[in-house]
Image: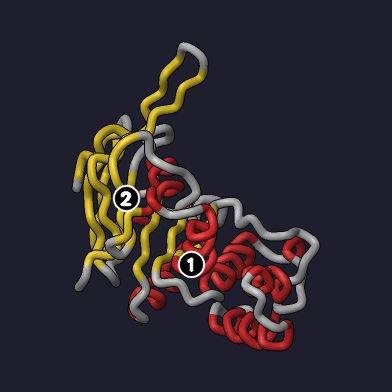
Amino acid sequence: MSTVIKVDRLSKVYNNGSVKTVALDDVSFSIKQGEFVAIMGPSGSGKSTLMHILGALDTPTTGDYYLANVNVAKLSDDQLADIRNQRIGFVFQAYNLLPRATSLKNVMLPLAYAGIPIKKREVMARELLVKVGLAERINYTSNQLSGGQQQRVAIARALVMNPNIILADEPTGNIASAQAEEIMTLFHDLHQQGHTIIIITHEPDIAEHAERTMHIKDGKLVTP
């Protein structure tokens, strides 16, 4: 399998006046296409900062991040936007859905940004909502859904542009344990279909679902 992500001596430092906070400290690792990886660490360990860099939402202070052998730091804003919209699917703990929009409209949103015609958008979004088990909830608004159902909508939205990589930040943090297992089953299915899955979590039972677990503590990678 080819290397899809390579991080080389990555550091991230935040400066707030005279106060310097080191969020990541000389982190290096690689992830191969099709791997299922968990990144674990306590609150404040730097794992969410790392996810933001992997998702091209933030930039490192020093070091290099290569996505499919391309140095992300060298890309233009438009190229970074293309990565976020087409190469990487994001799943967040807080779902980040439009509360008064239906499941269908939430999943259609990335397709609208990509300029896909509305009829095709609807077909693609419906197919994915059926795929994640929400055939009966397509026209429900987000605030009419349970936490687990909202996370399924978020996963469908993350998949709608058919990205190679799925980045999930604490994807089961706001839902009951039974629903969490259902969500993890969905991630297993995606992994079997060839997606690269990276999950940020502080829960050992969630990390156990992955093929490989990396641990971050105080901004340093403890387990490569």
Q: Is residue 222 above or below residue 192?
A: above
User: At label 2, which amino acid type do we have?
Assistant: Tyr
Q: Where in the figure is residue 50, as x and y percent of width and height? A: 38, 44
Residue 211 falls in which quadrant of the image? bottom left
In this rendering, the label closer to the viewer, 1 or 2: 2
Indicate left or right for 95 with 145 as reference.
Answer: left
- Please name the residue shown 23% across and 40% down the image: 9
- Please name the residue shown 56% across and 75% down the image: 160
- Please name the residue shown 25% across and 60% down the image: 31
Q: Earlier in the sequence, mark 1 or mark 2?
A: 2
Q: Where in the figure is residue 185, as x and y percent of width and height? A: 42, 72
Q: Please state, as top left, top right, bottom left or bottom right, where the N terminus lies in the image.
A: bottom left
- Please name the residue shown 69% across and 68% down the image: 106
User: At label 1, which amino acid type do we have?
Assistant: Ile
Q: Is residue 201 visible?
A: no
Q: Is residue 19 visible?
A: yes
Q: Is residue 68 above or below residue 39?
A: below
Q: Find numbered disc 2 in the image and state the secondary structure of the residue it sits on.
A: strand
Cα distance between the residues tagged 1 and 2: 29 Å
Q: Where in the figure is residue 12, as x and y percent of width and height? A: 37, 34
The crowding category of the residue bearing disc 1, from other C-alpha atoms within 10 Å (few below 14, some 14 to 19, many at least 20), is many
Residue 78 falls in which quadrant of the image? bottom right
Identify the residue position indicated by label 2 in the image. 65
Q: Find numbered disc 1 in the image and state the secondary structure of the residue it sits on.
A: helix
Q: Where in the figure is residue 100, as x and y percent of width and height? A: 80, 62
The residue lying furthest to the top in this view is 18
Identify the residue position indicated by label 1 in the image. 183
Residue 20 falls in which quadrant of the image? top left
